[in-house]
């Protein structure tokens, strides 16, 4: 395009050379653009507030707050002597705390690990075992 045509095209976009109806249309277009811009900003603000509120509520509800009746338990170890006829299951059932172990197998696995046993069937009468237990007494 030549410079003269470019200048003429720019004049067409200049509000000074528009008719009254074109000016009204142009102003309405600008007003709609401002409205859409405000709506987008308001939507982004509402979304941000919503995300913040949900994350705050989730983090608040997920806290492991303890009530006044909570009593801490401490993990201790003691030595026991295996008697004739004792099995690892008998020992586990006598000393397990289900609040801290999901099942007897988990407790037996820990006892075997502490005492370097390959499995719970390796115990003999007269042997000493170190076993874990929980108590509310702080020693």
Image (cartoon, rainbow, N blue to C red):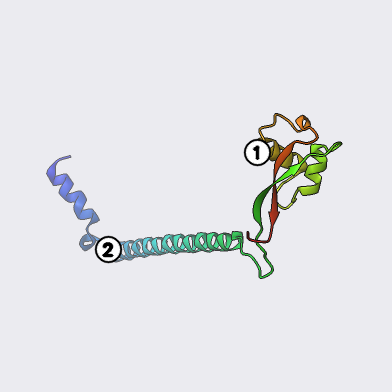
Give residue 77's position: percent from left, percent from top. 66, 48
Q: Residue at x 78, y 30 (%)?
A: 121
Residue situated furthest bottom in the rendering: 68
In the rendered view, tell whether residue 98 sits above or below residue 83. below
Q: Residues within 10 Å of mark 2 (few under 14, many from 20)?
A: few
Give residue 98's position: percent from left, percent from top. 75, 50
Q: Which residue is mark 1?
A: 114
> Does the image show residue 106?
no
Give residue 76's mark. Answer: none
Q: Secondary structure at mark 1?
A: helix
Quarter containing the N terminus = top left
Q: Residues within 10 Å of mark 1 (few under 14, many from 20)?
A: some
Q: Secondary structure at mark 2?
A: loop
Quarter containing the C terminus = bottom right
Q: Residue at x 72, y 42 (%)?
A: 107
Marks counted in the figure total 2
Q: Nearer the viewer, residue 133 or 43?
A: 133
Q: Which residue is mark 2?
A: 19
Counting residues from the start of the chain, the first of labels 2 and 1 encountered is: 2
> Does the image show residue 3?
yes
Q: Residue at x 60, y 59 (%)?
A: 62
Q: Nearer the viewer, residue 24 or 82?
A: 82
Asked if labels 1 and 2 touch by Cβ distance under 8 angstroms, the answer is no
Q: Nearer the viewer, mark 2 or mark 1?
A: 1
Give residue 84's position: percent from left, percent from top. 85, 36
Q: Nearer the viewer, residue 64 or 82?
A: 82
Give residue 10's position: percent from left, percent from top. 20, 52
Residue situated furthest front in the rendering: 126
Location of residue 34 (image quadrant): bottom left
Position of 115 with respect to 14 (left or right) is right
């Amino acid at each position: 395009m030549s410079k003269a045509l470019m200048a003429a095209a720019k004049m067409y976009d200049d509000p000074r050379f528009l008719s009254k109806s074109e000016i009204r249309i142009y102003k309405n277009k600008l007003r709609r653009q401002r409205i859409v811009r405000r709506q987008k900003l308001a939507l982004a603000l509402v979304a941000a507030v919503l995300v913040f509120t949900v994350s705050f509520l989730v983090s608040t509800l997920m806290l492991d707050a303890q009530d006044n009746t909570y009593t801490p338990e401490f993990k201790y170890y003691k030595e026991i002597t295996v008697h004739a006829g004792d099995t690892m299951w008998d020992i586990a059932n006598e000393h397990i705390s289900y609040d801290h172990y999901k099942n007897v197998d988990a407790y037996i696995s820990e006892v075997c690990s502490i005492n370097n046993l390959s499995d719970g069937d390796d115990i003999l009468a007269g042997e000493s075992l170190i076993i874990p237990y929980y108590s509310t007494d702080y020693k």
